[in-house]
Amino acid sequence: MKENQIIQRNKKNKTIVLLLLLPIISGLLVWLAGNAILLHSAAQAPVGAYLVLGGSIKREMYIAQVAKQYPQIPILISKGSQDPCIVGLFQRENSSMEQVWLEHCANSTFGNFYFSLPILKKWGVQHIKLVTSPTHLPRAKWLAQIILGFNGIWVETDIVKEVGVPGNRESPLKIVLDVIRSLMWAVGSQVMETKCQVVYKLTEVNMIQHCQSGFKCERQAQLESESICTP
């Protein structure tokens, strides 16, 4: 008799749990379906911004050339090279810096998307080009598709070949851990938002201060502070 009561109680508890989970699961499925429709639409939209991941000045050399061709498209450089070096690259290409923004909060690939997401959402971007390197794939693309994709932003990649030893190192464990926390934040970002407090336009970089204090760019950029700071 007692055993039957326990069985009946367990069945009742399972039913209650299922009834509680049903609206949550249904809501999640509806949201996923809606997001899939948004992504399909976003994929057809024109590129609304370039997101450049830090880790190699070659990517910034490339985006300086892109900015010359498409000066109207906003560019967000997430934790890139030293500010005056980026300014020098754009000056060398004679590229417009009016639509170029720098984000200095990220300290990892996950951080690149964690802090870039609210900026891209504020810009109303639906379709981005992600600028990274072969050594940074597939982790960067997976994280972008999870964090940005779950927020209705379509991700297309622009791959820049490296020269020498790149700054990024990929490992299976690192990829798995980053994918897991990206999935968690993809859900969390629907109700929470974290903003980077160190975001500014490239035109706002104080070159006088940097020239006075001194700086050194990566050898690949072939830039010297003397040439950048000379009027």
Image: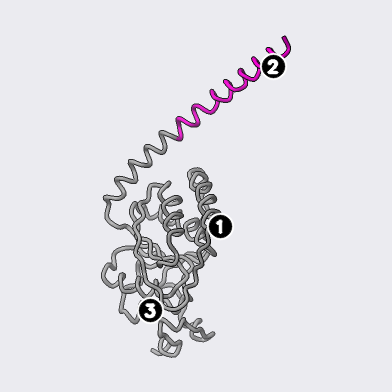
In the rendered image, residue 111 lying in the magenta stretch gets the answer no
Whether pointer 2 and pointer 3 mark residues with C-beta atoms closer than 8 Å, the reply is: no
Q: Residue 206 location, x and y as percent?
A: 47, 77
Mark 2 = which residue?
6
Judging depth in this view, the residue of 99 and 11 nearest the camera is 11
Task: Check disc 1 and give the amino acid type.
Answer: Leu
> N-terminal of the two: label 1 or label 3?
3
> N-terminal of the two: label 1 or label 2?
2
Q: Residue 144 location, x and y as percent?
A: 43, 55
Residue 75 vertical placement versus 125 (above, below): below
Judging depth in this view, the residue of 173 and 120 nearest the camera is 173
What distance separates the C-alpha of mark 2 from that of mark 3?
Answer: 73 Å
Whether pointer 1 and pointer 3 mark residues with C-beta atoms closer than 8 Å, the reply is: no
Residue 71 vertical placement versus 88 (above, below): above
What distance separates the C-alpha of mark 1 from that of mark 3?
Answer: 35 Å
Mark 3 = which residue?
89
Judging depth in this view, the residue of 113 and 205 nearest the camera is 113
State left or right for residue 67 relative to residue 197: left
Q: Which mark is residue 173?
A: 1
User: Most prominent secondary structure in the magenta stretch?
Assistant: helix
In the rendered image, residue 3 lying in the magenta stretch gets the answer yes
Mark 3 falls on what kind of element? helix
Assign the C terminus to one quadrant of the image: bottom left
> N-terminal of the two: label 2 or label 3?
2
Q: Please tell me which residue is depicted at 45% across the width and 32% down the height of the picture.
A: 27
Task: Check disc 3 and give the amino acid type.
Answer: Leu
Q: How many marks?
A: 3
Taking the view exactly as shown, the residue that stands out farthest to the right is 2
Q: Quadrant of residue 6?
A: top right
- Stretch of the chain drawn in magenta: 1-28
Q: Please tell me which residue is depicted at 52% across the width and 48% down the height of the picture.
A: 185
